[in-house]
Structure formats: C-alpha cells, structure tokens
Image (cartoon, rainbow, N blue to C red):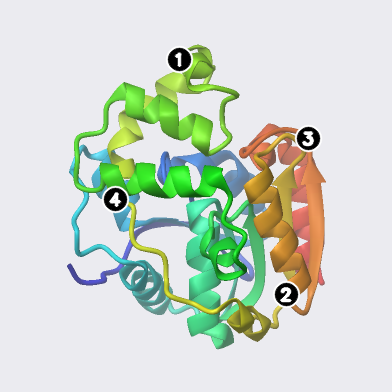
Amino acid sequence: MKPRVLVNEVKGEGPHVVLVPGQLTGWVSWTPLADALSARWRTVRVQPIHNELGSAGERGDAGYTAAIERESLLMTVDALGVETADFTGWSGGGRALIEFALAHPERVRTLTLVEPAAYWILDGRGESAPEVARLNQFLHALAGQEVSEDDLAEFLELAGLVPSKDQARVHPAWPRWVPHRMALSWSSEQADRDVAELAGIRCPVLLVHGSATTDWLKRVVAVLDERLPDTRVLELPGDHACHLENPDAFLAALERHLAQ
C-alpha cells in the first residue's frame, strides 16, 4: 500500500487549521466544529485512508502503517499548497499528528491533541497498563477481519466512550458508530519511537482530556505535558469525546491557542 492524497474538505478563509479525526467515525466527527471554525479560519477536514475505506466496509490492509498515515497527510497539505498550519487531532488522529510533527516539525505552527491514543509513550516509559495491553491485543486481532457489533461495543468500552460494552447499544451515538465499525480493522502498527524524541516538538501544544476518561489516556496527556517544551492542558467534563460534549468551551480554548 502506498500513501496518497487524502479525501478532504476546505471551508473558510484565513490561516489553515487541519482537523484529523479519530479511528472510528472519521471526519464526520469534526463537522460541527469545522463549521464554527471556518468563520475565522481556513478549515481543512481530512479523511484518513483507514476511515475512508473502513467506513465503506473494506477490511484492513496489512500494508497500512503509521508511515503511510504520516506521508499521506504530508501529500495532502502539499496538494493544498499549505506550507505551515495549525493541526488538531483527536484520539488516533492525535497519535498520527505526534508522528507527523516529529517527522515534519517545520510544517506545524501549533498542535492541539485531544486524548491522543499514543500508547507507545507509556510503553516507552515502562508504564504499560493492563487496559493498554488489552486494547492493543484487541485491535491487532481485528486487523483485516470482519468487525461485528459486539466487537464495536468492546472497542467503545476500551476507548472510554461508554462505561461498559453492555451499555454501548443504548448510547445515543450508537446508530452513528455502527456504520463505521470496519475502520477498526485498519489499525496500523504504532511508530517505533523513543519517548525522548518528544522534546523535538517545540511548537505550542494544547492538550485536552475529559474528566471521566480512562486513566491511561489521562496518563498519556500527563506524560506529553511533562515531555513537550511548550504545553497547556485543558480538562473538560466528560469522557473520550469531551471536546464534542463541550463544543463551546473547546472552541474557545482552541481559538485562544491558535491566536497566540
């Protein structure tokens, strides 16, 4: 599999803000926030390959890697004529942006990372929690496989989007999650990085987590706060989707961050 320009949508005028989504629902999750941002910023929503093909029902390709994610994003901003931009990513999108910023720091003006699923950071510190090992094992078992609704429910629990998989089907977002479940079969191997490399991300970084999110995701945010030179942390009420649950508070903090 080779990197390619990602499906994207551009709205508004002004400095570029690039929005990278999480692993499951893809770019649709950014729609309401992108519409609000486009009043003041040239807002770019991208649809990573795993979201595009997974949401179309295709099974994951074993050749899909973190490097393909990274270089596809680079090809996309190149194709749009974007030299530097403010990048915002949620969950898997946040993990991908850490990799992008490490490889191409000159292209990143600021980063905003909402609960990035970069569990390699904890592995690198010898802090792997049982929940992380379980999530890793679970996603690797789904690679290239058919993803059932039961699999989706278990992922939602592991990702901290529902209190338990038994409650997943009664969550208001369940009908929106189900059509995208095949994206979970596209989990790429995480980049082989040393935690010490994080010091190379020197741009301002806004780190966001929910008050009720899983402990391991909070710990990833805490380690990033310790390791990155220029950070601020925003805690919002709620779980892994706290920025979507509190759009006004999130957008206000993001606007302040972008304006610095």
Can you identify the residue that label 4 sits on? 186
Question: Nearer the N terminus, badge 2 or badge 3?
Answer: 2
Question: Which three-letter amino acid code belongs to the residue tagged 4?
Answer: Trp
Q: Which residue is mark 1?
A: 169
Q: Earlier in the sequence, mark 3 or mark 4?
A: 4
**Quarter holding residue 180:** top left
Say whether disc 1 or disc 4 marks the residue closer to the N-terminus: 1
The amino acid sitting under disc 3 is Pro
User: Residues under labels 3 and 4: Cα distance?
Assistant: 30 Å
Q: Secondary structure at mark 2?
A: helix
Residue 250: mark in rendering: none
Q: Earlier in the sequence, mark 4 or mark 2?
A: 4
**83 lies above or below 181:** below
- Where residue 220 sits in the image (x, y, percent)? 65, 58
Question: 57 and 135: which one is in front?
Answer: 135
Q: Residues within 10 Å of mark 4 (few under 14, many from 20)?
A: many
* Cα distance in 3D space between marks 4 and 2: 29 Å
Q: In the rendered image, which quarter is residue 5 located in?
A: bottom left
**Is there CB contact under 8 Å for labels 2 and 3?**
no
Q: Which residue is mark 3?
A: 237
| Contact check, label 3 and label 4, Cβ < 8 Å | no
Relative to 78, is 1 on the left or the right?
left
Q: CA distance from mark 2 to mark 3?
A: 25 Å
Type of residue at label 1? Arg
